[in-house]
Amino acid sequence: MKSYVLGEFGAEAALLDAARTLRARGGATLDLHSPYPLHGAEEALGLRKSTVPLVALVAGITGAVSGYLLQWYTVGYAWPLNVGNRPPHSAPAFIPVTFELGVLFSALAIFVGLLAVYFGFPRVHHPVFEVEAFRSASIDGLWLSAEVEAGDADAVAAELRRLGARLVSVVPEGK
């Protein structure tokens, strides 16, 4: 069974140093909780470069190509209607729908991808929300959470205290 060890820090530098130390120690999945972005958090947590831009690009190209092909097929083959002696394949007329479908596909792919991959689709509650003091993470608190096996929770809690955490809490996942 998993447990979450939470530590609140008073300074950004102490929080990032603790994250680096625990990452080097290994055995824990780390996350930082802060009311604002912290410079150096990605490096401290060892996060790899995001794949979101690639997903958006592929989905946008897919949407644009499908929008263009849909218009081309509809106007040129399925229902060739000659209005004002205009050509059936007029690329400038297809630009608005092509652009909009590219944007739509990109946005939907990012939204669904974030729900499914990053947020754990559809986990709406996390055990760390059970800690009353953790509410400060959205106001002024700087928190480090470590997901560990239940047997390692006390050792990680002691390590967080040694690294300068003001408050340390252990939350079992089943709570």
Image: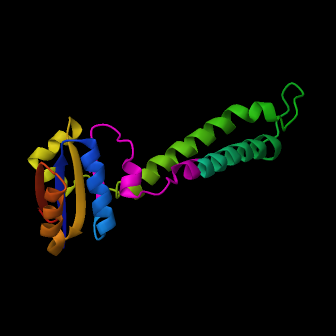
Image position of 94 (left or right of 52): right
How many labels were placed on the picture? Answer: 0
Q: Position of residue 67 (x, y in %)?
A: 68, 43
The spot of residue 22 in percent (x, y) is 28, 62
In the drawing, does residue 134 fall left or right of residue 43? left
Q: Is residue 51 magenta?
A: yes
The quarter of the image holding the N terminus is bottom left
Task: Name the colouring of the figure.
Answer: rainbow
The location of residue 77, given as percent across then percent down, is 81, 46
Residue 7 visible (yes or no): yes
- The x and y percentages for residue 142 are 23, 44
Between residues 159 and 118, which one lies in front from this camera angle?
159
Q: Nearer the viewer, residue 102 or 68?
A: 102
Residue drawn at (49%, 48%) of the image: 110
- In the figure, 26 relative to 162: above or below? below
Name the one closer to the observer, 147 or 17.
17
Q: Residue at x 68, y 38 (%)?
A: 98
Q: Is residue 25 magenta?
A: no
> Does residue 123 show up?
no
Quarter residue 138 falls in: top left
User: Residue visible at 19% across and 40% down?
Assistant: 141
Of 161 and 100, which appears nearest the observer? Answer: 161
Q: Quadrant of the C terminus?
A: bottom left
Residue 41 sits above or below residue 35 on the image: below
Q: Which stretch appears magenta?
A: 30-56
Q: Quadrant of residue 39?
A: top left
Above-or-below relation of 158 to 75: below
Residue that appears at 84% across and 28% down? 83
